[in-house]
Amino acid sequence: MSAPVLMVLASLLFAGMGVCVKLASQQYNTGEIVFWRGLIGMLFVLGVVRLRGGSLRTAVPLMHLTRAAVGVTALMLWFWSMSRLPLATAVTLNYMSSVWMAMFLVGGAILMGAARVDPRLVATVMVGFGGVALVLQPSLGPGQAPGALAGLLSGMISALAYLQVTALGRAGEPEYRIVFYFSMGGCVAGAVLAQFLPTPPRPHDLSGAALLLAIGLLATTAQMAMTRAYAIGRTLSNASLQYLGIVFSFLFGMLLFDDPVTLEAVAGMALIIGAGVVATRLRQQVAANTPDTTTDG
């Protein structure tokens, strides 16, 4: 399949995963959901590795440990926010990661004493957070502020996780190995967290087990499709299509959960999507203009 088709498929699958997480959160706590998502992901990738004849042996275990810790923290916050917020709101806040990365670039330039900070990056960050204000103001109900904070934090921490994935790729780690150790981290962290949350683990029934299985399969398949799309396609095109996940989640939330539809929320989502696409383009320009200081010997 081509990169655009893979990205559309991945966005749809991630949105479907969000539906399953929201439904499963009525029966399971966040730790349980993260555990099963990680375990199913590990088994899925193991099957892929056996078919391809790959290896899970790594020369950079500490990099994988750090990436797993950061990524799993973002995942837990995102899953918990989906149990507390309208589906499209939680997904939109998590997709703020591109805007957060633009803010990191601005902050890094200031700390490094740059004579001039790119005003386009500053404008992108402001537009992105303006979109957040529009999304949250009309759609938050009583007691949903903690979920909104968790959603915002999940986007910010996801930005750090993406930077770590980039570093692992530059270290020569294949995509399946990155996904495997991330899933392992989720499995371990979820099992520990499940024991300490106020809602104790509950016995499975057929519908609950089916939801957990769907979460793991949808998330891992989407992750593999997205990774493949970024490997063969253009970064900006992929990043733009990735935001279809917000649209799919908005439709699912409206049709399945009767989530409110307001003009302000739709406008805010549009601003965040636009800011994310522009932020991706600007990051590409920054990377292209940064001289390569490495040598061959």
Image: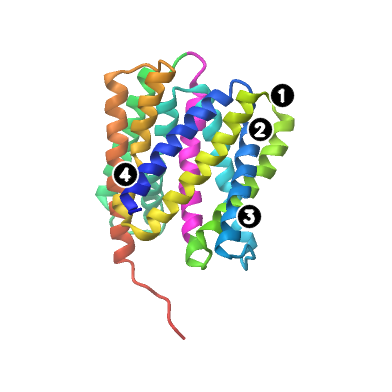
Q: Nearer the viewer, mark 3 or mark 2?
A: 2
Image position of 88 with respect to 108: above or below: above
Would you say 88 lies left or right of 122 here? Answer: right
Check contact, mark 1 vs mark 2: CB within 8 A. Answer: yes
Q: CA distance from mark 4 to mark 1?
A: 38 Å
Q: Which residues are magenta?
A: 142-166
Q: Residue at x 62, y 68 (%)?
A: 59
Marked residue nearer the N-terminal end (4 or 1): 1
The residue pinned by badge 1 equals: 202
Few, some or many C-alpha atoms within 10 Å of disc 2 (few <14, some 14-19, many ≥20)?
many
Few, some or many C-alpha atoms within 10 Å of disc 4 (few <14, some 14-19, many ≥20)?
many
**Rendering coords of residue 211 (x, y %):** 57, 29
Marked residue nearer the N-terminal end (1 or 2): 2
**Rendering coords of residue 275 (x, y %):** 29, 41
Element carrying mark 1: loop
Q: CA distance from mark 3 to mark 4?
A: 30 Å
Give the amino acid at mark 2.
Glu
Give the amino acid at mark 4.
Leu
Q: Nearer the viewer, mark 3 or mark 1?
A: 1
The residue pinned by badge 2 equals: 32
Q: How many numbered marks are there?
A: 4
Query: Quick one: 222 or 152, which is closer to the camera?
Result: 222
**Rendering coords of residue 159 (x, y %):** 45, 47
Query: Quick one: 176 or 259, which is closer to the camera?
Result: 176
Element carrying mark 4: helix
The residue pinned by badge 4 equals: 241
- Is residue 52 within the magenta segment? no
Image position of 274 with respect to 90: above or below: below
The residue pinned by badge 3 equals: 65
Q: Nearer the viewer, mark 3 or mark 4?
A: 4
